[in-house]
């Protein structure tokens, strides 16, 4: 049975005189995919940054499994099982695919810096377990044939897959994806949609994405933001017909707006 994992209540983030997120509230249940859409400047990425500790909101509450995480550092939040990717791919281009995925395992290591100087049985066990986890991700993401390939030489679509494999190597409970379909062709988007349905069996997912049809295809629930507020929520079929959503995107609730949001 699904239960609330993440609860945001009246979260507000300001930058000087600009209120980027305005008393925003929403919930994330386990085993679900949540899409967050909205016009440019609606506050979508800022919300992610407030959840993951990059920003601390001035007001409100961010509860993760009953614990207040507002004000925690990004490292502390990752350690609690919340992992994210960014709009721009952030991989180590000269390192291999396997090495990039391994870099996501450092937070799971039980070793300290001095174990690199003084080898111990614990260090060997730690390394073996980490490489086993890397191999699992290589297999799950169908990247095994590229394991030794420098990631910078791969096509963009494969690099995006490596980035998400690295995030999943942390064994998250909540995976947050910022514009993961950006720059992908339709074939890669279709494969990615199928992959997310598999990842959903392992953890909850929140996605910010401008590709509205993609959000409609993969999301169990959609939140629509405008000026830092949730203006609509529910299934994609519900929100795409909401007059407030159409007005936010086009300044009108006309049929042309309905068409742009994928309505039939």
Image (cartoon, helix red, strand yellow):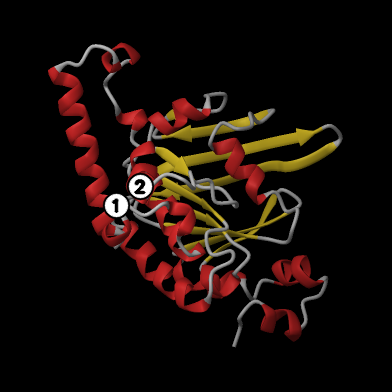
Q: Residue furthest left?
A: 121
Local SS, label 1: loop
Q: Is residue 262 left or right of residue 126?
A: right
Q: Position of residue 3 (x, y in %)?
A: 35, 47
Q: Position of residue 178 (x, y in %)?
A: 56, 53
Count neighbours of disc 1 (C-alpha within 10 A) and say few if under 14, some if 14 to 19, many if 20 or more: some
> First in sequence: mark 1 or mark 2?
2
**Label tally:** 2
**Which residue corresponds to mark 2?**
168
Q: Residue at x 59, y 51 (%)?
A: 88
Q: Position of residue 260 (x, y in %)?
A: 69, 79
**Which residue corresponds to mark 1?**
202
Q: Residue at x 20, y 22 (%)?
A: 123
Quadrant in the picture for residue 114: top left
Local SS, label 2: helix
Q: Which quadrant does the C terminus fall into? A: bottom right
Q: Nearer the viewer, residue 193 or 36?
A: 193
Q: Is residue 256 left or right of residue 190?
A: right
Determine whether 144 is above or below 64 in the image: below
């Amino acid at each position: 049975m699904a239960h609330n994992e993440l609860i945001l209540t009246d979260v507000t983030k300001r930058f000087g005189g600009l209120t980027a997120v305005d008393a925003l509230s929403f919930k994330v249940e386990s085993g679900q995919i949540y899409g967050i859409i909205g016009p440019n400047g609606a506050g979508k990425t800022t919300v992610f940054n407030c959840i993951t500790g990059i920003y601390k909101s001035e007001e409100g509450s961010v509860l993760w499994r009953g614990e207040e995480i507002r004000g925690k550092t990004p490292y502390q939040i990752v350690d609690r099982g919340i992992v994210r990717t960014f709009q721009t791919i952030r991989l180590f281009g000269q390192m291999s695919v396997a090495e990039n995925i391994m870099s996501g395992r450092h937070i799971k290591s039980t070793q300290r810096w001095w174990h690199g100087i003084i080898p111990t049985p614990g260090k060997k066990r730690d390394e073996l377990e980490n490489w086993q986890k890397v191999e699992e991700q290589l297999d799950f993401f169908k990247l095994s044939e590229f394991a030794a390939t420098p990631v910078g030489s791969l096509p963009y679509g494969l690099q995006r897959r490596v980035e998400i494999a690295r995030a999943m190597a942390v064994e998250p409970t909540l995976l947050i994806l910022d514009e993961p379909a950006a720059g992908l062709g339709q074939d890669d988007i279709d494969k990615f949609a199928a992959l997310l349905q598999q990842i959903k069996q392992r953890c909850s997912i929140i996605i910010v994405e401008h590709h509205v049809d993609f959000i409609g295809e993969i999301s169990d629930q959609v939140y629509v933001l405008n000026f830092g507020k949730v203006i609509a929520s529910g299934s994609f079929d519900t929100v795409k017909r909401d007059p407030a959503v159409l007005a936010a995107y086009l300044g009108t609730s006309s049929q042309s707006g309905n068409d742009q949001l994928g309505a039939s």
